[in-house]
Image (cartoon, rainbow, N blue to C red):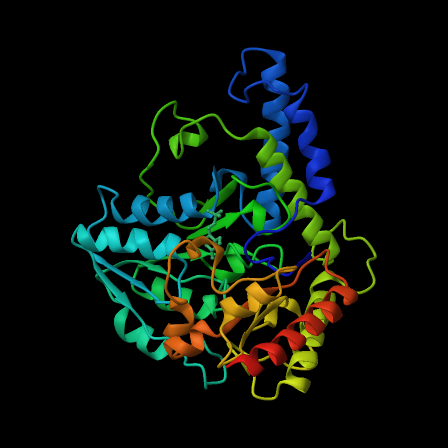
Amino acid sequence: MIYLDYHATTPLAPEALEAMLPLMQELYANAGSTTHAAGRQVAELIERATVELAGLLGAADDELVFTSGATESNNLALFGTCLHPRQKRRKIVSVATEHKAVLDPLLRLERQGFEVVYVPVAQFDSLQPGVVDLGQLAEVVDEQTALVTIMLANNEIGTIQPLRAIADQCHRVGALLHTDATQALGRIPVDVDLLDVDLMSFSAHKFYGPKGVGGLYVRRKTRRVKLQPQIVGGGQQHNYRSGTINTAGIIGMHAALLGCYRLNAWSDGAESVGVVEWRRVAGLRQRLYDRLIQREPSLSLNGPGWPSEFGEAGELTRLPGNLNCCFYPIEGQSLMMDVPELAVSSGSACTSAEPGTSHVLRAIGLTEEQARSSLRFGIGRFNTEQDIELAADWLLASLEKLRRLI
Ligand code: PMP
């Protein structure tokens, strides 16, 4: 099997597994049990990991809330700010290309009386499909706006949003900015102060950490975000999120993110790695695209293009390992079924149980048929050049065969 579905999830990094094992074996004490030495030992490990993890994001340790993943973080961010008893504003602004873990909480808030405005994004034939229209955003975000929620990087077409410019618009009128950075963390450098966001969701299993653990950054240093807890009980994590913390998960998440920063030379302890990971992955994406387009000139790229020479990762407009192509008139499902040894996706994994086409591709203006004829590739750390060559061979052979059948 060739795994090209790194946006759905990533394999666990060996360094993350190694860091987690002691917490699943001898270091099993509850980090809240500070009455005994065993509990204090685990609490200290967690504290050290939290400080370092926060540091990688440009945050302080008391600005992180650990959760079960990005779905919970998004729910906490949206409900926690909008339903806070002191929240007087009743408008929320977003875009149609968000993940369901943002769109569904927004639907619920709308049913509870909030006005939710979706600002249009650039269309498929523009320079940067999926990017929010900043002019329209400026018209919509006003003194009634409680929250703007716009993802940092899209999970289907890889579009990276100009969050700093969005933040300026929000803060001019006192609105909060939340970003779902689930696909960005570990793939591009992320710093909460450079982006100037107030809340940021992330999930360990997208950056080679374990599943079922993630976090929400909540700004407290320079502005104090008011957040109503959504899970109440024992008052853990400064009462922001009750429940015994997932100690092994947090330690694994920290080790995994540190690994990403090292392999990309974004952290102090960066190893001399030669070609940094994101550049290698971008090179593999280029290779896959070149192989496909050479033999299939009618194939079209969904989402932003990329320059042949990359500058810094912080300047990217598309995630380095993301490719999304339309193979019209061949259906994505038919291709996937015909190449069962290739793990790719036709939309996001989280909505794959639902019938219907990708709401992201529809939002950038693709027809129902074009969206149904598209596949998403997510290339990552453990992919090799041979993987890419073989995947291209399989896809091209299958396309030729399927075209003869229609
Ligand atoms: N947001 C985005 C952009 C995602 O890609 C995903 C995972 N597909 C999620 C949220 C949900 O994350 P989790 O699986 O950690 O709940």
Q: Nearer the viewer, residue 370 or 227?
A: 370
| Residue furthest front as drawn | 405
Residue at 43% of width from left, 27% of height from top? 243
304 displayed left or right of 267: left
x, y percentage for residue 122? Answer: 41, 79
Picture quarter containing residue 382?
Answer: bottom right
**Res 284 seen here:** yes
On screen, 32 above or below 117? above
Q: Nearer the viewer, residue 169 or 178?
A: 178
Residue at 19% of width from left, 56% of height from top? 114
x, y percentage for residue 36? Answer: 58, 11
On screen, 154 above or below 227? below
Residue at 22% of width from left, 41% of height from top? 85
On screen, 205 above or below 154? above
Residue at 66% of width from left, 77% of height from top? 396
**Res 159 seen here:** no
Location of the N terminus (image quadrant): bottom right
59 displayed left or right of 218: right
On screen, 114 above or below 41? below
Q: Nearer the viewer, residue 174 or 7?
A: 7
Q: How many numbered marks does the figure carry? A: 0
| Residue furthest left as drawn | 113
| Residue furthest bottom as drawn | 297
x, y percentage for residue 73? Answer: 42, 45
x, y percentage for residue 256? Answer: 66, 45
Q: Nearer the viewer, residue 405 or 387?
A: 405
| Residue furthest top as drawn | 36
